[in-house]
Amino acid sequence: MPGKLSEKSVMVDDQAEASQIYNRGWYGNPQSGGSLKLEILEALYLLETGRLVVLRGDEPIDFVQLLRLGNKDLPSFEIKYLVYRDLRGRGYVVKSDGGSADFRVFPRGGSPSKTTSRWWVLALSERSIFQLEKVLADLTKSKGLRKDLLLAIVDEEGDVTYYEVRRASPSGRHKRKLPEEKMEGLFTGDRVIIDDPEDAKTLQSEHFFGKLLGDRLQLSLIEAAYLMQNGQLVLKNAKGGRAVNAEQLKGHARKVQRDFDLRLKAYEDLKGRGLIAKTGFKYGSHFRAYEGDPNRMHARFLVHAVPEDYSAIWPEISRAIRLAHGVRKEILFGRVGEKEIDYIRLSRCRP
């Protein structure tokens, strides 16, 4: 079917042909008089699939010429086209959003005249920067419109990977109160040792802190700082026996772990939610979080504590999501603010 190039769109003037294109895929926007106005993205896809001939004047133009025109008109046009093409190839009706998102995607079998769109889609290059603050803003907007947010990432070979973004509110069942009496620990520089066997047993078997070394218990610096803040632990330096207070412990921890305060806030929040938090080092994250007894169940979450202005390259985000998926866990990014922590879950999605 012929369409005429007109500035930033392609017009199909024949009423019968316009109606056929619109009704068989909901391409374009019907105009008064029965013509159809196609966006360059739509026209390019119809040209590629052999359903449209695009004329400039009386001369047809090819795919590359129309692609160049799209690149002049729209930033990252080729990225958006590859996502549009992929979604159309999956059988979805796709419309440009015109707002903060790139596309609105309707469920299979749906149409703009009968159903509401299901997804709000952002088309991004793998070379773009993941900015958590922007993702949160986009997520808030999509939820305000009752849409699910999809991030469509185009790699160097043109393949598209989709990530669904949701807020999360993780919680667990471990609500036991810590013992009121203070316990003594030895500060060794890298960790803390609880020497009393009864104290070690209480902290480990009832509250799942640390790891047993025979009858003794080793605590991480984060666990020790948490217990000191809650009044359950007093420390002495293992070298000279001098007392170590909470601020001295945290001051040392900051020197060996620059993001210690960030991690500690996330750890406190996870504990407050009834979760059991253990190191996530072997999984490339800050914590693995259990909803109940770690000896009876697997961790459900991998949690990475990040600052409010967190940004990263997409290959790092993709690697974290893939690793979590490979070990059957959910990856949560905990955005640590002054008053609260927002948890964002990213999961790979096949629309």
Image (cartoon, helix red, strand yellow):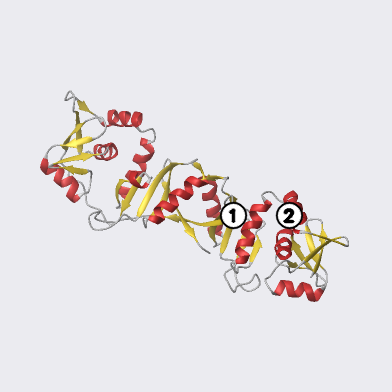
Query: On the picture, is 118 further left or further right than 329?
Result: right
Q: Residue at x 18, y 43 (%)?
A: 212
Q: Residue at x 75, y 55 (%)?
A: 64
Q: Earlier in the sequence, mark 1 or mark 2?
A: 2
Q: Secondary structure at mark 2?
A: helix
Report the number of discs.
2
Q: Secondary structure at mark 1?
A: strand
When asked about the image quadrant of residue 17, the answer is bottom right
Q: Is residue 344 visible?
A: no
Residue 329 image position (x, y, % from top left): 37, 56
- Residue at label 2? 67
Near mark 2 (Cα within 10 A), the count class, few <14, some 14-19 or many ≥20, is some
Query: On the picture, is 22 further left or further right than 327?
Result: right
Query: On the picture, is 188 further left or further right than 22?
Result: left
Name the quadrant of the N terminus: bottom right
Q: Is residue 279 above or below residue 39?
A: above
Amino acid type of the residue that numbered disc 1 sits on in the rendered structure:
Leu
Q: Residue at x 36, y 36 (%)?
A: 261
Q: Residue at x 54, y 50 (%)?
A: 137
Which numbered circle lies on residue 99? none
Q: Are the residues tagged 1 and 2 within 8 Å (C-beta)? A: no
Query: On the picture, is 244 further left or further right than 337?
Result: left
- Residue at label 1? 122
